[in-house]
Amino acid sequence: MQQSKLRITKLPSIPLNANTTGTDRQQRPFVPSPRETWEMLALCSSTYC
């Protein structure tokens, strides 16, 4: 259960970082860290989902 919660808290961590940098978000909205996002999604669907 603890591991699942960690994943849930880590998921919003990625978008939060992108939102923190307003200038970066405007320049590259979908190029902050695609690999990390994919890895997180894969982990979530592998463990959580």
Image (tube, rainbow, N blue to C red):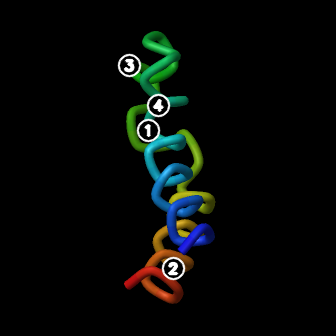
Q: Amino acid at mark 2?
A: Ala
Secondary structure of the residue carrying numbered label 2: helix
Q: For mark 3, what is the residue?
A: 26
Q: Earlier in the sequence, mark 2 or mark 1?
A: 1
Label 4, residues with CA under 10 Å away: few <14, some 14-19, many ≥20: few
Instruction: Find the distance from the CA under tag 2 to the CA under tag 4.
Output: 19 Å
Which is in the foreground here, disc 3 or disc 2?
A: 2
Q: Residue furthest bottom?
A: 46
Instruction: Find the distance from the CA under tag 3 to the CA under tag 4.
Output: 14 Å
- Relative to 15, residue 9 above or below: below
Q: For mark 4, what is the residue?
A: 16
Instruction: Find the distance from the CA under tag 3 to the CA under tag 2.
Output: 27 Å
Secondary structure of the residue carrying numbered label 1: helix
Instruction: Find the distance from the CA under tag 3 to the CA under tag 1.
Output: 14 Å
Task: Give the residue at x 42% y 23%.
Answer: 19
Q: Earlier in the sequence, mark 2 or mark 4?
A: 4
Q: For mark 2, what is the residue?
A: 42
Which is in the foreground here, disc 3 or disc 1?
A: 1
- Relative to 5, residue 10 above or below: above
Q: Earlier in the sequence, mark 3 or mark 1?
A: 1
Q: Earlier in the sequence, mark 3 or mark 2?
A: 3
Q: For mark 1, what is the residue?
A: 15
Image-quadrant location for residue 12: top left
Asked if the residue at tag 1 contacts the one at tag 4, i.e. Cβ–Cβ closer than 8 Å, the answer is yes
